[in-house]
Image (tube, rainbow, N blue to C red):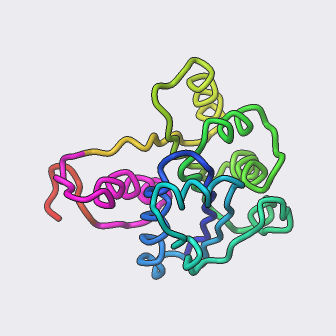
Amino acid sequence: MTKIAVAVTGASGSVYAKVLLEKLQQLRNQVDEVSVVWSDNARTVWEHELGDKSYEQVPFKAWDKNNFYAPFASGSSSYSALIICPCSMGTLGRIAGGISNDLVTRAADVMLKERRKLICVVRETPYNLVHLRNMTAVTEAGGIICPATPSFYSRPQTTEEIAYTVIQRVLQLAGLDTGGYKWGESS
């Protein structure tokens, strides 16, 4: 079984975090534990974009962004992945620069140093050269940059279905069997 940490930052794209957390609930048979850490702006952006405080009903353990006693802040933990969704460019820049100033960036540093999965669901457009260099640095260090770029092969009809085209890929990258649409394969 798997332990996964999820970090939600204040980048636009709260729908991606919402769908990710819902899908992780549905995959409880594959996941032993999910822990969540929120950046300062994550909840504010969620409320603005989604118009609610449904983040309060997330059934996973939430960790304060300054609590370095969270298990995934240490390489001795058995967490296999950190998914940062959405991942702000500020967070990505701190990770690329090796700055571990909060639980999100410390957990990312742990995943990289332990050669575990760090999946950054970056949400920005367009990218500037600094963004691209930071993505390159994180990739060269072993992280996975998975832009929040939806696909439309499955003909999604709702905002959540569109977001799921990204989240399905993220969950697959984390090693989970999500079922769902796969190009050229029957569902």
Identify the image quadrant of residue 67: bottom right
Number of numbered discs: 0
Residue 154 position in % (x across, y down): 18, 53
**Image side of residue 23 versus residue 56, left or right:** left
Residue 61 position in % (x across, y down): 67, 77
| Nearer to me, 185 or 126 | 126
**Image side of residue 102 versus residue 150, left or right:** right
Identify the image quadrant of residue 168: bottom left
**Image side of residue 155 versus residue 13, left or right:** left
| Nearer to me, 7 or 108 | 7
Query: At 69% from the left edge and 51% from the top edge, which residue is drawn?
Result: 111
Query: At 35% from the left edge and 66% from the top edge, which residue is drawn?
Result: 178
The magenta stretch spans residue 155: yes
The quarter of the rendered structure image containing the N terminus is: bottom right
**Which segment did they paint magenta?**
152-179
Q: Please determine whether, in this image, residue 141 is positioned above or below residue 84.
A: above
Residue 151 position in % (x across, y down): 27, 45
Identify the image quadrant of residue 80: bottom right
Residue 14 position in % (x across, y down): 49, 55
Q: Please determine whether, in this image, residue 130 is positioned above or below residue 13.
A: above
Query: At 77% from the left edge and 60% from the top edge, which residue is drawn?
Result: 65
Q: Please determine whether, in this image, residue 91 is positioned above or below residue 18.
A: above
Query: At 51% from the left edge and 73% from the top edge, which residue is drawn?
Result: 54
The quarter of the rendered structure image containing the C terminus is: bottom left
The magenta stretch spans residue 17: no
| Nearer to me, 7 or 186 | 7
